């Protein structure tokens, strides 16, 4: 029952927004990255269609809202009126340099208090060292002491914001000398810190192509009850090295093999909120909604729903 | 292997580009060159943020030269917070120092295409335009006013026969004063408006520009000497309205108090000081 214990202790969903006894169809569906250029489209979505609005949610990079006031927060407030939102951190540097963590999480917590996000996540990476912030997501070596540092970082973060988080697998471009593989590393970090996992299927696909790991085997090593969210996104070949090095660009449509891997992941994990990430080369809102609908269709497939009910019942009966 | 050593070496590579420091940590030396993805990501993230935070500087310099200058800034002042919101606080001063360097030595080392002639139009006003860009950003992101002084509030006081000049007020948090050359402000405005007005007056005078946020948009305007005195009196802890207007009248006996006060109310510049 250790698995059920973990899930029960994790506030992947705030109680207010995710009543425990919702049926699978009412669960958080597929979401989209929130882009300022789509604000008018989002605010003009029909509010009287709760089935659409309840399931459609938006994810933002938490640190983009580290502002004292002004229009940026106001537009997030406007979106929040009719949609669930998720806070996805990119600057927490869970794997290193935790000295400034309290100041960082203080700002995250203020945002959480106001916006009551349905999901809060960060990355299982490092991005700060010696007081400098490198503004990218650098992988950790998968060693025991790096694992401990990641666990310490998750602890600091979770106690700073007062709720548990999901941590995301990085995109790997090359292998660093390590003691364990990535599923082991992430699962151990989650079990020991009480956090959950955000599995980015595009990152996994990229890592598999760049470093030769078996993506399906990777997914099979991740316990379903730890997974609170899935990301999918587009990637591009490296401008100089071509297809031998895939880059996590978030600048293109989701590639067919990533959709395929998503289907396999949902078959293993059951119903899990899926986010279509897009950060560059932003298409129209209509275009992104079409991609989001594909993800939603995968979520509504029979076998995914069946898994959800089984997993959901097990968790609920232990709370 | 110790993960601190790995992160130290990785950081050194990101900052200085020496790949060899990462060799002991890489599984496959043939893949070492792929480390460039992370270094490119670091610079791209920072330079994109500077371009977003200093849009008129970028427009004036052109994308290529701006990015070269921004990259140099990243080398000198890498971000220190886990966010790029507001990154570039030192960029205007950095530009001043860089231009001073151009006076004494060839700037070929930074590869800026027109840097050989530091007085070229491209660099005139650049630092002031950076100050204005940054002030614009800070005003946009500043805290919302706690209790804006409105026309209705003042009307109420007058109806109750309360002397409103005794009211303690201060500038709302979005109001910022920037000290720049007058033609830098003109150039900044024409860059914002997409005009291509040539710079005509090089012997420009120093002026104060006030920036403030009104209904989600940032406004900017030149202040007269008396208006500067008024606004400076209301900065920080604030003052009574009467004291603030006296400060303006001391500098200009013809200062139109009621026009200025109405403008302050219409532009929501003041908030009631609860302290
Ligand atoms: Fe992701």
Image: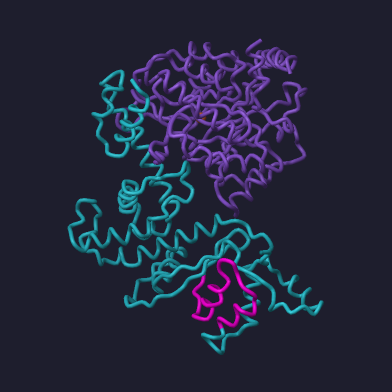
Q: In the figure, is residue B106 to the left or right of A81?
A: left
Q: Residue furthest bottom?
A: B253
Query: Could you tell me what secondary structure mostly forms the magenta stretch?
Result: helix
Q: Quadrant of the C terminus of chain A?
A: top right
- Please give the letter of the chain rendered in cyan: B
Applied colour scheme: by chain
Q: Nearer the viewer, residue B30 or A154?
A: A154
Q: Colour of chain A?
A: purple
Please name the residue shown 34% across and 53% down the image: B66
Give how far across and how far down residue B133 sits, in percent. 45, 60
Placement of A166 over or under A99, stated as above or below:
above
Please name the residue shown 73% across and 26% down the image: A26
Chain part drawn in magenta: B221-248
Give how far across and how far down residue B45 sits, in percent. 41, 42
Q: Is residue B3 magenta?
A: no
Q: Is residue A291 visible?
A: no
Q: Nearer the viewer, residue A188 or A198?
A: A188
Placement of A204 over or under A239, stated as above or below:
above
Q: In the figure, is residue B192 to the left or right of A118?
A: left
């Amino acid at each position: 029952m250790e698995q059920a214990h973990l899930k029960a202790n994790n506030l992947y969903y705030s109680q207010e927004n995710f009543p425990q006894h919702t049926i699978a169809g009412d669960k958080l569906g597929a979401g989209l990255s929130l882009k300022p250029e789509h604000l008018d489209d989002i605010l003009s979505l029909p509010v009287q269609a709760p089935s659409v609005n309840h399931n459609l949610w938006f994810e933002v990079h938490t640190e983009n809202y580290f502002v004292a006031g002004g229009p940026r927060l106001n537009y997030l407030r406007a979106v929040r009126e009719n949609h669930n939102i998720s806070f996805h951190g990119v600057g927490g540097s869970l794997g290193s340099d935790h000295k400034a963590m309290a100041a960082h999480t203080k700002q995250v917590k203020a945002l959480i208090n106001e916006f009551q996000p349905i999901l809060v996540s960060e990355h299982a990476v490092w991005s700060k060292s010696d007081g400098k912030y490198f503004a990218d997501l650098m992988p950790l070596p998968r060693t025991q002491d790096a694992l401990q540092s990641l666990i310490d970082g998750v602890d600091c973060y979770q106690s700073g914001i007062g709720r548990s988080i999901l941590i995301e697998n990085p995109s790997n471009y090359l292998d660093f000398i390590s003691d364990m593989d990535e599923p082991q590393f992430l699962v151990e970090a989650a079990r020991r810190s009480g956090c959950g996992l955000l599995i980015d299927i595009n990152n996994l696909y990229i890592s598999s192509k760049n470093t030769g790991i078996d993506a399906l085997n990777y997914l099979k090593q991740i316990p379903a009850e730890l997974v609170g969210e899935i990301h999918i996104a587009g990637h591009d070949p490296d401008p100089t090295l071509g297809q031998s090095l895939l880059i996590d660009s978030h600048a293109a449509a989701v590639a067919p093999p990533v959709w395929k891997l998503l289907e396999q992941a949902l078959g293993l994990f059951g119903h899990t909120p899926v986010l279509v990430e897009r950060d560059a080369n932003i298409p129209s809102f209509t275009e992104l909604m079409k991609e989001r609908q594909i993800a939603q269709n995968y979520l509504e497939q029979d076998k995914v729903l069946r898994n959800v009910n089984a997993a959901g019942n097990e968790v609920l009966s232990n709370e | 292997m110790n993960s601190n050593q790995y992160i130290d070496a990785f950081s050194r590579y990101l900052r200085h580009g020496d790949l060899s420091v990462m060799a002991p940590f890489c599984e496959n030396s043939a893949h070492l060159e792929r480390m460039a993805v992370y270094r490119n990501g670091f610079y791209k993230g920072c330079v994109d943020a500077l371009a977003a935070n200093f849009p008129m500087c970028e427009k004036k310099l052109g994308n290529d030269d701006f990015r070269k200058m921004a990259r140099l800034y990243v080398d000198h002042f890498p971000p220190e917070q886990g966010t790029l919101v507001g990154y570039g606080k030192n960029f205007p001063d950095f530009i001043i120092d860089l231009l001073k360097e151009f006076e004494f030595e060839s700037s070929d080392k930074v590869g800026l295409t027109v840097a050989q002639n530091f007085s070229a139009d491209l660099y005139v006003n650049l630092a002031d335009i950076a100050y204005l860009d940054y002030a614009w950003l800070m005003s946009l992101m500043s805290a919302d006013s706690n209790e804006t002084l409105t026309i209705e509030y003042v009307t109420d006081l007058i109806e109750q026969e309360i002397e409103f000049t005794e009211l303690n007020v201060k500038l709302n948090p979005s109001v910022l004063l920037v000290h720049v050359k007058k033609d830098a402000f003109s150039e900044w405005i024409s860059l914002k408006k997409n005009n291509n007005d040539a710079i005509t007056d090089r012997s420009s005078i120093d002026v104060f520009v006030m920036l403030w946020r009104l209904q989600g948009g940032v406004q900017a305007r030149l202040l007269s000497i008396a208006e500067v005195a008024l606004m400076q009196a209301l900065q920080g802890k604030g003052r009574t309205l009467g004291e603030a207007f006296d400060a303006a009248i001391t500098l200009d006996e013809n200062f139109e108090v009621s026009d200025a006060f109405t403008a302050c109310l219409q532009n929501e510049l003041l908030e009631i000081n609860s302290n």
